[in-house]
Image (cartoon, rainbow, N blue to C red):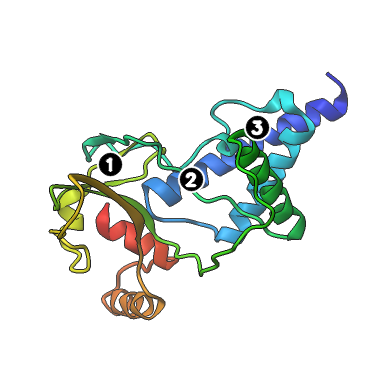
């Protein structure tokens, strides 16, 4: 391996270790030490290295994984359909690349699309959950986990008043996926109360919402 290749391999190893540490703090401990922008910068650097040196890609690389492993204190829930996360498109080139991939996928399904209709909405940053209803009754709620197996947090989700416990005219089995989040005003008020009580404050609304459920 050349010196450049050795340097790239070493840097990739350092980035994987650092990102894994941040993933544990973010997903498992709900206690991040850096913000989303700093994390994305590290992840983008690793992606660029792996793109330039494909031999450095490993199955356990943070670029190849979704979410985090299940915590032992919760029962496992295997998702019937893999629960994925959203990707990022930070500029016009990345957006056009996504559109090209979407067209290619549709073409393989013999679906021709001249143009797309867009639905744009703010991204809610919370804890991704899956709600399962059987005969209109809420029976289980789970986190995304690693996308294949999540955590059963049904009892904690039952405390959220806005989650309906029964549905009318629902199919026999229904799964609803969304985000549990904390509005910014509520987040600020919560941190004020915690600070006044001498408790540690949360770094962002996402982790305060996740911490309340896990």
Callout 2–callout 3 Cβ contact below 8 Å: no
In front of the other: 43 or 140 = 140
Between 117 and 114, the residue placed more toward the observer is 114
Tell me the SS state at disc 3: helix
Residue drawn at x 41%, y 38% as measured from the top left: 147
Cα–Cα gap, marks 2 and 3? 15 Å
Residue pointed to by mark 2: 23
First reached walking from the N terminus: tag 2 or tag 3: 3
| Quarter of the rendering occupied by the N terminus | top right
Along the line of sight, which residue is nearer the eye, 192 or 41?
A: 41
Front residue of 95/5: it is 95
**Of marks 2 and 1, which one's residue comes earlier in the chain?**
2
Label 2 neighbourhood size at 10 Å, few (<14), some (14-19), many (20+)? many
Q: Which mark is residue 151?
A: 1
Name the residue located 73 percent from the left edge and 60 percent from the top edge.
Answer: 91
Residue 148 in picture, x, y percent from top left: 38, 34
Residue pictured at 13% horizontal, 48% vertical: 135
Q: In the figure, 122 relative to 3: above or below?
A: below
Q: Is residue 150 visible?
A: yes
Residue 184 locus on image (x, y percent):
41, 76
Estimate the x, y position of residue 139 in percent, counting from the top left: 14, 47
Judging by the rendered image, the residue that carries numbered circle 3 is 13
Mark with earlier residue (1, 3)? 3
At a point 56% along the width and 34% down the height, the residue shown is 64
Left or right relative to 151: residue 98: right
147 lies left or right of 156: right
Circle 2: element type: helix
* Element on which disc 1 rests: strand
Does any portion of residue 15 appear in the rendered image?
no
Q: Is residue 160 above or below residue 154?
A: below
Question: How many numbered circles does the render carry?
Answer: 3
């Amino acid at each position: 391996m050349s010196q450049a290749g050795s340097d790239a391999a070493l840097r990739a190893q350092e980035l994987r270790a650092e990102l894994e540490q941040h993933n544990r703090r973010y997903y498992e401990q709900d206690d991040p030490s850096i913000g989303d922008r700093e994390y994305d910068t590290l992840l983008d650097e690793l992606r660029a290295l792996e793109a330039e040196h494909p031999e450095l890609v490993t199955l356990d690389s943070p670029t190849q994984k979704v979410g985090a492993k299940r915590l032992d204190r919760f029962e496992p829930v295997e998702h019937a359909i893999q629960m994925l996360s959203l990707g990022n498109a930070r500029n016009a080139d990345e957006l056009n690349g996504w559109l090209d991939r979407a067209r290619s996928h549709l073409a393989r399904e013999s679906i021709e699309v001249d143009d797309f209709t867009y639905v744009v909405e703010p991204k809610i940053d919370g804890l991704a959950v899956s709600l399962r209803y059987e005969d209109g009754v809420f029976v289980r709620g789970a986190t995304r986990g690693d996308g294949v197996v999540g955590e059963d947090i049904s009892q904690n989700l039952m405390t959220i008043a806005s989650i309906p416990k029964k549905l009318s005219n629902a199919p026999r089995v229904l799964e609803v996926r969304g985000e549990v989040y904390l509005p910014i005003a509520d987040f600020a008020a919560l941190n004020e109360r915690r600070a006044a009580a001498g408790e540690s404050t949360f770094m962002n609304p996402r982790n305060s919402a996740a911490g309340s459920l896990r």
